[in-house]
Amino acid sequence: MTTVGVRRSRRLGRGAIGRLVPLAAVATAGALLLSACGSGSDSGGTSKSLTFWISTVPGQDAGWKKMVAQYKKETGVDVKLVNIPYDGYTTKLHNAAQANSLPDVAAVPALDPIWSNKLIDLSSIANNKTNKINANFLAKDSSGKVLSIPSDVTASGMFINKSLFEKAGVSFPTSPSKTWTWKDFIAAANKVREKTDAKYSLTFDQSPSRLRAMVYEMGGKYVHADDSGKFSVDAATKKAVNYFVGLNDDKTMPKSVWTSGADPSAMFQSGDVVAYWSGVWQVPAFAESIKKFEWASVPTPAEPVQASDVNSGGMTVGFNNNGDAAAAATKFLSWLYEPAHYQALCEASGFLPVESGLSPKYPFKSEAAQAAFKLYNESIPLYDPISGYFNSAQTNWVLKGKSLTEDPTKTELGKAINGQQSADKALENIVAGYNQQVGGAS
């Protein structure tokens, strides 16, 4: 089974991406794989009763529960919500496709070629200008058919120990329109570390996504494919990755995160680290878990590019099981993505919206958490389109029947940080891994 997944996290966030230039529609795919499915199946719901599969932790289904209840009240259509454990979700979808028993609507963590030909075209929703859905994060085929719309999006971001910054008397930006460069940020964090005797200036998730975000911000494209599907890295990427490897000196950054899997979040939450490069999904946890110091989200560095690595938090799809159910599913999803309804979903589930122009009010008691979501809302519209490249690329790969089974980034850069090879050699090996697994046109 070949699937492409989205980040599994608590998926809480906030934002909108109105000013981004839409990326090219993802991928080409075989006509057979993406041909419209006929409506002759006897499976699925009816015009008045639909099944909706989700997979989320208790509490995070609040938005979905609220919206299906409201929809039934307004329309009389019963949308039956089924919350399936994440560990077996993709397998259950795969098996349901084989058994001709797919749900009518689903929020999925992955696309799977076995049921891609059963997907309803969501173009009418995605292209409705009233919805202001960011086109960068749609899953499309080469004909323009919209296979899925994100339920929400996630983005990389920077957290600081605000108490340490204040103790050291070091200022930090609060507006993305006047953000710092990576070099400015590192200089400030090092100054705070030295003045407060903190252990490290920065911890940095052992994550290709977080590295991509940094590279994008420093003007590189990271591992990027040309029109033929061949991957390479540009000069700006080499410079950025060499800089990153050099930061792992057991002062600015601990080597143990990228070489042996030490927990960067736990390090930051201990209070002994100045800053943490992670993402919006940390916000709700920090709102509850960090009591010994004040924390804050701060604008992402730009050197010179304002960017992040932005992904789908979940992928909303409809299945064409039969004519009546498919029409009813399309109507439900059209209703769901109307801005007022979608904002209500985001508020109740703590989602970072894929639609621009919204102002969700989240139920967090933590002022730091509220400020963090406000910052993401202000930041994401400024991000360069490169921020959505990898999200679109993954869809491209799966529609060609490929997947990046193992991203070599962590292993190869861990070796570079350990001094076993140069950063440039690590990049050569990473490029080779991408070309082997997902390179080429077909």
Image: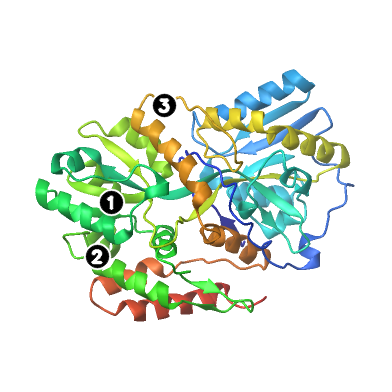
Q: Is residue 182 at all visible to an observer of this figure?
A: yes
Mark linked to residue 264: 1
Q: Position of residue 224 (x, y in %)?
A: 52, 72
Mark linked to residue 364: 3
Closer to us: 317 or 310: 310
Question: Can you name the residue that lies furthest to the front here?
Answer: 178
Closer to us: 396 or 385: 385
Q: Quadrant of the N terminus?
A: bottom right
Q: Amino acid at mark 1?
A: Pro
Query: Is residue 344 toward the left or the right of residue 295 in the image?
Result: right
Mark linked to residue 442: none
Q: Is residue 8 at all visible to an observer of this figure?
A: no
The structure residue drawn at horizontal position 21% and vertical position 57%, both measured from the top left corner, is 187
The structure residue drawn at horizontal position 16% and vertical position 60%, both measured from the top left corner, is 251
The structure residue drawn at horizontal position 57% and vertical position 66%, both measured from the top left corner, is 403
SS at badge 1: helix
Indicate whether 345 appears above or below 85: above
- The CA span between labels 1 and 3 is 24 Å
Quadrant in which residue 142 is drawn: bottom right
Q: Amino acid at mark 2?
A: Leu
Which badge, 1 or 2, is on the more N-terminal residue? 2
Residue under pointer 2: 247
Query: Is residue 441 toward the left or the right of residue 260 in the image?
Result: right
Indicate whether 416 appears above or below 204: below
SS at badge 2: helix
Q: Amino acid at mark 3?
A: Phe
- The CA span between labels 1 and 2 is 15 Å
